[in-house]
Amino acid sequence: MKAILTQHDRLCLEQMKQFGLFAEIIPQKLAISNGVVAAFCSDGDQFYDLYSHTARVCEEAVGTIRIHPITLNGGGILMSGQLREEQCQHGQTMQENILAAVVMKGIKDVFLYTHFPCGIAISHCLGVIDQALLLRMAKNRLKEANPELRIKCFFHVEKYDEQEGGSH
């Protein structure tokens, strides 16, 4: 899927970083020794980048990789409760799976991901700001369901032409 990150999108992402909505992850400051549950989009073109990023963070933080992936098309934004009914149902399933996994695996850390371009977001006419806000809503809903969770949000921007990409 070819989508263009516009100059406006880039400016918005940069401003969201400046306002503290995105921050650089310092793996050594994360207490993830028991691993992470990661809510990824199952997009085959993006999954490797998302999983690899999580693996790198885990490796740098605690020297081992323990990731319990939960994947559905749309990733973390599905749990926002703001998409079409079918997608909200998928989001409920994803949330239930995350909550079950943290109990089964004894993991308190959850990483929520979205990426650009995202087919689910595009099908809902969502821009990068919308995606960031929906990811934040998803985090809040998950935190309401289990206040003990430590949840980090990630926004991966794919490279296109001269554009810079990476997890933000």
Image (cartoon, rainbow, N blue to C red):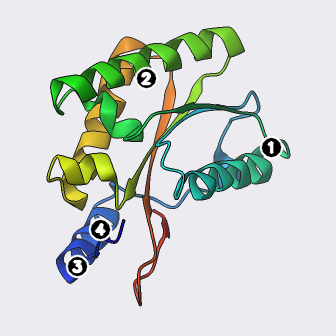
Give the residue pinned by disc 2: 94
Location of residue 81 (image quadrant): top left
Q: Quadrant of the C terminus?
A: bottom left
Mark 2 or mark 1: which comes first in sequence?
A: 1
Q: What x and y, as percent, mark residue 125?
A: 14, 53
Mark 1 residue type? Val
Secondary structure under badge 3? loop
Q: Residue at x 41, y 90 (%)?
A: 162
Q: What x and y, as percent, mark residue 102?
A: 60, 16
Q: Nearer the viewer, mark 2 or mark 1?
A: 2
Secondary structure under badge 4? helix
Q: Quadrant of the N terminus?
A: bottom left
Q: Which residue, as the protein is rendered here, is positioned at the far right? A: 63
Mark 4, Cα crowd under 10 Å, few <14 / some 14-19 / many 20+, is many
Q: Residue at x 33, y 17 (%)?
A: 144
Mark 4 or mark 1: which comes first in sequence?
A: 4
| Residue 164 horizontal side relative to residue 119, left or right | right
- Mark linked to residue 62: 1
Mark 3 residue type? Thr
| Residue 161 horizontal side relative to residue 86, left or right | right
Give the residue pinned by disc 3: 6
Q: What x and y, as percent, mark residue 83?
A: 18, 33
Mark 4 residue type? Leu
- Mark linked to residue 80: none
Location of residue 23 (image quadrant): bottom left
